[in-house]
């Protein structure tokens, strides 16, 4: 996006003061992602000139784009080889992968909003040590859940966060701060795209999962309610927290066209029908799709600033792949990655559909 001046600097954990001048690099890749921990990797042009006390955990990597910090996180690995040094860092949410829950988080019989619980898990994980200065915003998402995570189980904090993300919460980390929303991030839409916005023809692919019937998707969340009063004719069976879709061609005409797909899901307990309906709509939006994979490299002239490139943001697309696959519809960004090599920047996005797509093969 644009032709940015990008620097990589090292700081002490939680500080904004560089411990050395920006280090020249041969290549640098950083990014943002939905429901995961983002990374930064760089091949530095020097194997010497780095601070003598540079250590994983003690120091952080910061990426500055046109003078503004866009990424920060703990340095995890330094490997010197020949005339270069490779460094790998993760965003500040990484610390939750090495923190155990110290408090009881038990809501069995007393449902709690998933967004609220998400914030409580973060508080638990970082209260004992937040020297990195990690911040988060986790408003209620409108979906109530029940969880049983007593402190004596030594639950890894990130595992709890991932569980809630699978059930009800979307999150992303932008420059050292986590933002969470309901089942879908509510970021402003970005401009629509066609083939002309990409350096090469975007990659599109179809899989057998592409055409799973949407009625069964609604059933996934509804059946997660415990207990769930299913009609005998309802093509969903709930066992504990698991849901099995067992529809047939009589119930869902699309199955007779594309074939039956059966799966088992563990969404955790969703405590009431209203919450189940909200989650079901999200699963429906994510799963009624025609293209499972969509990725492409945007032209530098694409009319968007880096502050708008938020994972979860939606956009309209009208794309034709080399294979002749033509797709029109709405997508949401799953990840954004910027790579800089030889002074040139390339920006890649991956996306998944939101809602039904118009698919043809030319």
Image: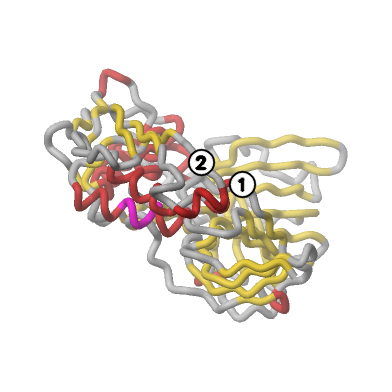
Residue drawn 78% across the image and 68% down it: 200
Q: Specify the segment rendered in magenta.
A: 279-283
Query: Do the residues bearing badges 2 and 1 touch, measured as CB atoms within 8 Å?
Result: yes
Looking at the image, residue 238 sits to the left or right of residue 214; the answer is left
Q: Is residue 280 magenta?
A: yes
> Can you tell which quarter of the image residue 202 is in?
bottom right
Q: Position of residue 344 (x, y in %)?
A: 78, 67
Q: Is residue 349 above or below residue 298?
A: above
Residue sitting at the far right: 82
Q: Is residue 139 above or below residue 300?
A: above
| Category of crowding for the residue at label 1, using alpha-carbon neighbours closer than 10 angstroms: few (below 14), some (14–19), many (at least 20) | few
Instruction: Between residue 34 and residue 308, name the one nearer to us.
Output: 34
- Secondary structure of the residue carrying tag 1 is helix
Quarter occupied by the N terminus: bottom right
**What label does residue 31 carry, if any?**
none
Near mark 2 (Cα within 10 A), the count class, few <14, some 14-19 or many ≥20, is: some
Q: Position of residue 146 (x, y in %)?
A: 22, 36
Query: Viewed as shown, does residue 166 lie left or right of 315?
Result: left
How is the protein colored in the picture? secondary structure
For image coordinates 52% across by 55% down, the residue present is 17
Main SS, magenta residues: helix
Left or right, residue 187 beside residue 78: left
User: 264 or 305: which is nearer to us?
Assistant: 264
Q: Which mark is residue 261?
A: 2
Q: Which residue is at a point 26% across and 36% down the rendered structure image?
A: 269
- What residue is shown with label 1? 208
> Is residue 256 in view from this perspective?
yes
Locate residue 132, reporting x and y percent: 43, 45
């Amino acid at each position: 996006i644009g032709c940015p001046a990008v620097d990589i600097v090292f700081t002490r954990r939680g500080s904004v003061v560089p411990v050395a001048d920006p280090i020249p690099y041969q290549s640098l890749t950083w990014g943002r992602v939905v429901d995961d921990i983002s990374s930064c990797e760089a091949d530095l042009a020097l194997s010497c000139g780095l601070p003598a006390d540079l250590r994983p955990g003690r120091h952080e990597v910061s990426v500055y784009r046109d003078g503004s910090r866009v990424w920060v996180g703990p340095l995890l690995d330094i490997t010197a080889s020949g005339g270069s040094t490779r460094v790998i860092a993760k965003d500040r949410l990484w610390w939750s992968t090495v923190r155990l829950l110290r408090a009881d988080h038990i809501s069995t019989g007393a449902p709690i909003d998933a967004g609220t619980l998400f914030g409580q898990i973060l508080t638990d994980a970082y209260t004992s040590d937040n020297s990195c200065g990690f911040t988060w915003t986790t408003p209620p998402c409108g979906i109530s859940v029940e969880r049983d995570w007593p402190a004596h189980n030594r639950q890894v904090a990130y595992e709890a966060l991932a569980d809630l993300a699978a059930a009800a919460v979307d999150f992303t980390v932008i420059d050292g701060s986590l933002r969470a929303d309901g089942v879908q991030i509510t970021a402003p839409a970005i401009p629509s795209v066609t083939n002309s916005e990409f350096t090469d023809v975007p990659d599109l692919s179809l899989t057998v999962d592409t055409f799973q019937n949407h009625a069964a998707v609604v059933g996934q969340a509804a059946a997660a309610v415990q207990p769930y009063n299913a009609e005998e004719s309802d093509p969903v069976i709930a066992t504990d927290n698991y849901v099995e879709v067992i529809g047939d061609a009589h119930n869902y005409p699309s199955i007779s066209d594309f074939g039956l797909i059966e799966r088992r899901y563990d969404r955790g307990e969703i405590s009431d029908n209203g919450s189940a309906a909200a989650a079901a709509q999200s699963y429906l939006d994510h799963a009624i799709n025609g293209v499972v994979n969509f990725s492409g490299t945007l032209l530098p002239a694409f009319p968007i600033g880096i502050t708008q490139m938020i994972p979860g943001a939606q956009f309209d697309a009208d794309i034709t792949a080399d294979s002749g696959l033509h797709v029109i519809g709405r997508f949401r960004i799953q990840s954004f990655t910027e790579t800089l090599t030889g002074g040139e920047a390339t920006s890649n996005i991956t996306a998944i559909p939101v809602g039904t797509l118009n698919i043809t093969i030319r």
